[in-house]
Image (tube, helix red, strand yellow):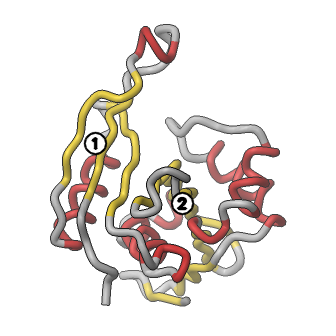
Amino acid sequence: MTSEGSNSTAINLRKPVKDDGYRLHQLVAECPPLDTNSIYCNLLQCSHFAETGVAAEIDGDMVGFISGYIPPKQPETVFVWQVAVHEKGRGQGLAKRMLKAIVARDACKDVTHMETTITEDNAASWALFRSFARDMGAELTYHEHFEKDTHFGGKHDSEFLLRIGPFTKPA
């Protein structure tokens, strides 16, 4: 799927492939404050979870990536693990287009909800998911899910679980 950005730069949205794993690792490293994962984890995101992930490219350069999965006990939910948009892809609504591309996939045919976790101070992510919820005509609820001291040993801010839905597939 190809879509045009506001500056007429063609952005190609596609399913990731295992060869994208190292490129994903580099992209996340260039998108602070995102947490980096091991290259092996990125390889799994690009292979095992390809049906619920999306890679965005401009002229062959990876400028965006969303990793996600459908939790085994929640077949109606796609969980968004990480959203990365390089500065070259920002300002074009790319992250929201990638979210919509995922929920439009056949792998998400039974999906009516989206979940993710976000730290309280991540204004860009809050804005993204609130905008996605509005576009989907869906409710957004949230609560503290992973607590700083209990779950992260005081080394990472608490994460809030956002739940969006129910919604229907975008047209």
Q: Looking at the rendering, which quadrant does residue 38 occupy? A: top right
**Residue 49 visible at all:** yes
- To which residue does mark 2 refer? 66
Q: Residue at x 55, y 75 (%)?
A: 107
In the rendered image, residue 155, in percent from the top left (x then y), is placed at 51, 13
Q: Residues within 10 Å of mark 1 (few under 14, many from 20)?
A: few
Quarter containing the C terminus: bottom left
In the rendered image, residue 56, in percent from the top left (x then y), is placed at 58, 72
Q: Is the C-beta separation of discs 2 and 1 under 8 Å?
A: no
Q: Residue at x 21, y 73 (%)?
A: 135
Q: Amino acid at mark 1?
A: Ala
Q: Amino acid at mark 2?
A: Ile
Circle nearer the N terminus (2, 1)? 2
Mark 2 element type: strand
Say how many tags the image has: 2
Gap between marks 2 and 1 measured at Cα? 18 Å
Position of 24 relative to 141 (above/below): below
Left or right: 154 with respect to 107? left
Position of 118 relative to 148 (above/below): below
Quarter containing the N terminus: bottom right
Position of 54 relative to 44 (above/below): below
The disc at residue 123 is 1
Q: Residue at x 44, y 11 (%)?
A: 150
Q: Residue at x 54, y 60 (%)?
A: 66
